[in-house]
Amino acid sequence: MDLFSNSHARGEGWYLSLMSPNTKGANFAWLDPSRLYCSSKALSDCVKDLLKPFYNDTVDLVAGIDAMGFILGTAIATTLGKGFLAIRKAGHLCVSTKTQEYSDYTGKEKVIEVREDVLKPGLHVLLVDQWIETGGTMKAAIKLVEEQGATVVGIYREKVRPGLQALLGGCFNMAIPTLAVPDSGVAAVAIENSEGGKWIKEHYKYSHCIPEELQPQIDRQYLESFRNFSPKN
Ligand SMILES: O=P(O)(O)OC[C@H]1O[C@H](OP(=O)(O)OP(=O)(O)O)[C@H](O)[C@@H]1O
Ligand SMILES: Nc1ncnc2[nH]cnc12
């Protein structure tokens, strides 16, 4: 028996209506996406949707962000046949780490960390989290990955190309053509159109599960499906 799935029409993003609204108030995120992972069909459709833009890309390693990013991250890694790297909230890893400070939707100052013996120049990393609200967490994870020389999509446009342009343009008056094919990127169930969310979409290849017509509800932080939400559906 698959939980929840029988009564749901299977259009684009059908499984999003399985997500639960916050019933506990302002100290918590405005919804809990994790209920959709309880249905095998919802989980596998969600993973397929997140992988769609990346099937033809080189992904060497999937990195998931503590805690809920571990779930989708490992599901994506095993689907791709790749390894999984855990980006942890600071204070748990008993090995040498690189750390990054950030603040997220709670407004609190936080730190994430990653073991320092895995990320290397040339490694193409797909970064996965459950949700991007202010983008603070994902931007911190991108920084951790890039500071160790590994690649998240967009680095060519942002960093390498302007350098090359300055060098070759300065010496030979040459224009460098746009490097079109990115290496890997960022995936989350939703990317809110906050300042940080938009920055991520502009600078990195990304995937999410939100159909275009639903994005305004995500940005208003209220889903119409909450009206009919019942823990039994
Ligand atoms: O875009 P931001 O504002 O930075 O917020 C996004 C982060 O917040 C949530 O994690 P949270 O720390 O709430 O909980 P978790 O440990 O359950 O993943 C979410 O899964 C992201 O990691
Ligand atoms: N997991 C999450 N679900 C909903 N909103 C969020 N904002 C930050 N994290 C979130």
Image: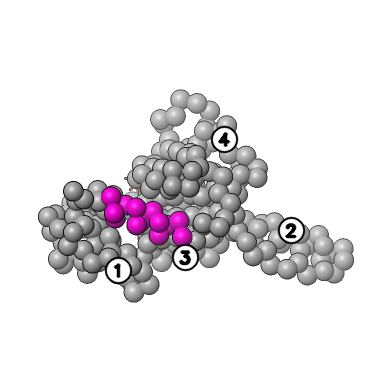
Around disc 3, counting alpha carbons within 10 Å, would you say few (fewer than 14), some (14 to 19), or many (20 or more)? some
Labels 1 and 3: the sequence-earlier one: 1
Helix, strand or loop under label 1: loop
Q: Can you see residue 69? A: no
Let me know if residue 16 is in the magenta part. no
Three-letter amino acid code at the position of disc 1: Gly
Cα gap from disc 2 to disc 4, whole angstroms: 27 Å
| Residue appearing at x 85%, y 69% in the figure | 173
Let me know if residue 48 is in the magenta part. yes
Around disc 4, counting alpha carbons within 10 Å, would you say few (fewer than 14), some (14 to 19), or many (20 or more)? few
Cα gap from disc 2 to disc 1, whole angstroms: 45 Å
Please state which of the two labelled residues, at mark 2 or mark 4, is closer to the viewer. 4
Cα gap from disc 4 to disc 3, whole angstroms: 29 Å
Query: Would you say the residues marked 1 and 3 are in contact, meaning their CB atoms lie under 8 Å apart?
Result: no
Coloring scheme used: one colour
Magenta residues span 40-52
- Which residue corresponds to mark 4? 118
Label number found at residue 11: 1
Relative image position of residue 97 (x, y in whole percent): 52, 32
| Residue appearing at x 61%, y 44% in the figure | 123
- Which residue corresponds to mark 2? 163
